[in-house]
Image (cartoon, rainbow, N blue to C red):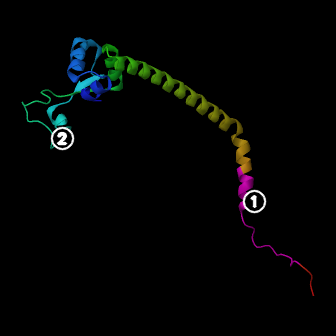
């Protein structure tokens, strides 16, 4: 996420957010955040509603934060929104881990069932296939009374 988007989310100014990043630089390694280059940031600019270079607007390239950087940022900011966001992020990661553990357990159980019942199901499917095959036009007796 862009620094300006996170600033809005955490209810602080982008300037304040970036100040805290600079003051806590050791908490933001390269895999937590990086700064866009000039070419990358040009793609973000609106063609109509942007100010000319040197006349307001951004004077530096925006920072981009990964999910780990966004969490770390929430921990260094002191706004109520950042505190609540930090708590929600932690709860979300805990829930995701619980879901992953549940899915792993379910996948393990399914694999065990496949191994245990594979031969039994195979026999059933073979019988079903045989029943579904059409017979070779056997001679049929007519139904009803012969005159």
Q: Quadrant of residue 141?
A: bottom right
Tell me residue 140's x, y (percent).
Answer: 83, 75
| Residue closer to the observer: 68 or 87 | 87
Q: Which residues are magenta?
A: 125-143
Where is residue 51 drawn, in percent x and y? 11, 36
- Most extreme residue toward the bottom is 147
Left or right: residue 127 versus residue 112 is right
Outermost residue toward the left in this view: 54
Q: Is residue 94 magenta?
A: no
User: Residue 55 versus residue 136: which sits nearer the camera?
Assistant: 55
The residue at the point 43 percent across, 22 percent down is 88
Q: Nearer the viewer, residue 11 or 134?
A: 11
The quarter of the picture where the C terminus appears is bottom right
Rendered view: 145 above or below 114: below
Label 2 packing within 10 angstroms: few (<14), some (14-19), many (20+)? few
Mark 2–mark 1 distance (CA, rounded to whole Å): 67 Å
Q: Is 104 on the left-hand or right-hand side of 13? A: right
Q: Left or right of 88: which side holds 45?
A: left
Q: Are marks 2 and 1 in contact (CB under 8 Å)?
A: no
| Residue 43, horizontal then vertical, whole percent | 19, 39
Read off the residue under disc 2. 46
Q: Nearer the viewer, mark 2 or mark 1?
A: 2
Which residue is labeled 1 in the image? Answer: 131
């Amino acid at each position: 996420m862009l620094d300006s988007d996170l600033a809005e989310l955490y209810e602080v100014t982008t300037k304040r957010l970036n100040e805290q990043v600079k003051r806590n630089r050791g908490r933001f390694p390269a895999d937590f955040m990086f700064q866009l280059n000039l070419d990358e940031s040009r793609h973000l600019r609106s063609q109509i509603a942007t100010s000319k270079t040197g006349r307001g607007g951004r004077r530096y390239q925006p920072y981009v934060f990964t999910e780990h950087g966004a969490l770390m940022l929430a921990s260094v900011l002191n706004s109520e929104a950042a505190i609540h966001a930090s708590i929600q992020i932690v709860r979300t990661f805990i829930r995701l881990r619980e879901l992953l553990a549940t899915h792993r357990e379910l996948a393990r159980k399914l694999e065990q069932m496949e191994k245990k019942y594979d031969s039994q199901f195979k026999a059933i499917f073979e019988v079903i296939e045989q029943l579904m095959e059409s017979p070779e036009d056997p001679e049929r007796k007519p139904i009803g009374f012969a005159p």
